[in-house]
Image (cartoon, helix red, strand yellow):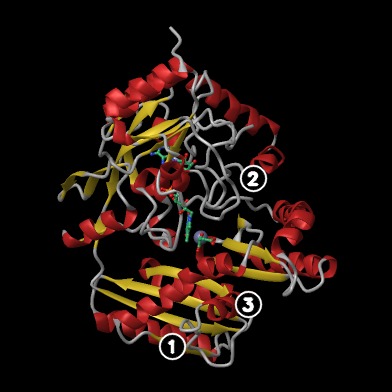
Amino acid sequence: MGMTPSAFIAHCQSLLGEQYVLLDETDKAPYLRDWRNRYQGKALAILLPKTTEHVAEIVKACNQAKVSIVPQGGNTSMCGAATPNDSGQQVVINLKRMQSIRGLDISNQTVVVEAGCILQTLQETARAQGFLFPLSLGAQGSCQIGGNLATNAGGTNVLRYGNARELCLGLEVVTAQGEIMHGLRSLRKDNTGFDLRDLYIGSEGCLGIITAAVLKLFPLPVAQWTALVAVPDIPSTIQLLNLFQKRTAALLTGFEMMSKDSLDLTAKQFPHMKNPLANDPAYTVLVELSDHESEEHARMLMETVLESAFESGLASDAVIANNLSQAQSFWTMREHITMAQAQEGANLKHDISLPISSLHAFIEETDRVLRQKFDGVRIINFGHLGDGNLHYNVAPPIGDDPQHFNRTHEKAIHDIVYAHVEKHHGSISAEHGIGQLKLPDLEAHRGSIAHQLMRSVKHALDPNNIMNPGKVLS
Ligand code: FAD
Ligand code: MLT
Ligand code: ZN
């Protein structure tokens, strides 16, 4: 049985309560534009369910009314994945009212959390119980667990604890037809057929709606030491990474690379966030060690590894944070590169990963070609080097109008960067996902067989193409 749009809205209002069905344009506005201000959509309504049953009922009604759905969390996507199209016929289902932490199992070291829980809230709740929830990223004050899982988010702790996927044991999902898949299993071993959990993780809202998850917790480290290290070039940065890996093994929890240009930009936009290292090093590495033994043990390790780095010429200077607030200021500087870029004006982002052994050749070759073709172009290169993940971003020459520069050169610049990514067997999306931004590049990148298999999975799980159409797959 079909359902008219007005009957659909009335049904949602009676289910959720009128105040949770946003129809007014001013109320809808914050949900219709992406974080980077690249995409502006329209929507029939913004729906704010409170329970999994609400979500299931809405999805069923969407199937009847032939209304497609954009699931939305904190709306921090870097690739327009959570923004509706401009038809005005889609609904956004934002999970922000489903934020409860349903339970924490101390012996199993797991937590059951609803999809709308803000990442930082979960981190703080876990910490208060003596646990670490390690997923950590610049948007943690606003992104939601559901969004983190739907994008398989990465961030700054991946080299020790893995992506969101590795942190998830079970999922509760509302399928594209409105059934509830009860998969909140808190097992570390479970080989019972195809892994449906892993299908939904990273599916960017295109297969179903994640409503809750079982996530892993870890013991809180007793000590953390953070240092900024001045490094002359990329090969030395990689050798420094390998040195830390060899000498500190699982204690290495952060290894972030920041080029001089990226820190110059941060200091320009946020003058109180200046690199404390003298002489503007070509590269600054933020290293973090987390120790379960003692403060002294961690500090001693940091110092001895840095001494070896100085002796072998890998590093020329370093500053070890003396206290928590100094360590936080290092992280704040790192995490503000994105904000600095946003404030400076539109730029072309490339969230890529490469085998660590290919990073140097990739950067050298791609920098050279871009600088030859686009005189004065600024390359804002930083990222999770310990994971081989570069945020290789391209900004217009100083004085150029960013919008005009991007309109004119975006495709050519993407093509150059992605051709070098392919040459070095990398990925065009390390952690941000495909969304609508990289949709045109996906098929060429993954190959036609993989692309066709993805289409088959989409068709099998979402035969009415109701879930986030126009994202990931065209
Ligand atoms: P949204 O942006 O709302 O949605 C993202 C995608 O997930 C969309 O496709 C949406 O449809 C889908 N979705 C959302 N919720 C659900 C759900 N419950 N069920 C099904 N699908 C859903 N990303 C990283 O990986 N690493 C970083 O270090 C990082 N740093 C960032 C720093 C800043 C300042 C910003 C703005 C973003 C950063 N991001 C990073 C990108 C982004 O924050 C992450 O991808 C985050 O995981 C998205 O979560 P969200 O709740 O905002 O999701
Ligand atoms: C980061 O690592 O800071 C994020 O992924 C955001 C970005 O790429 O700008
Ligand atoms: Zn990142």
Q: Vertical placement of 112 versus 430: above or below?
A: above
Q: Secondary structure at mark 2?
A: loop
Q: Which residue is mark 2?
A: 438
Q: CA distance from mark 1 to mark 2?
A: 38 Å
Query: Quadrant of residue 195 in the image?
Result: top left
| Amino acid bearing label 3 | Asp
- Residue at horizontal 58 percent and vertical 67 percent from the top: 341
Position above or below: 224 against 366: below
Q: Which mark is residue 230?
A: none
Q: Amino acid at mark 1?
A: Val
Residue denoted by label 1: 319
For the C terminus, the quadrant is top right
> Callout 2 environment at 10 Å: few (<14), some (14 to 19), or many (20+)?
many
Pinpoint residue 26: horizontal percent, then vertical percent.
44, 45
What amino acid does circle 2 point to?
Answer: Lys
| Residue 251 placement (x, y as % from top left) | 36, 69
Query: SS of the residue at dot 1?
Result: strand
Of labels 1 and 2, earlier in sequence is 1
Which residue is at 24% across, 64% downward?
220
Q: Nearer the viewer, mark 1 or mark 2?
A: 2
User: Can residue 171 be seen at all in this image of the molecule?
Assistant: no
Disc on res. 261: 3
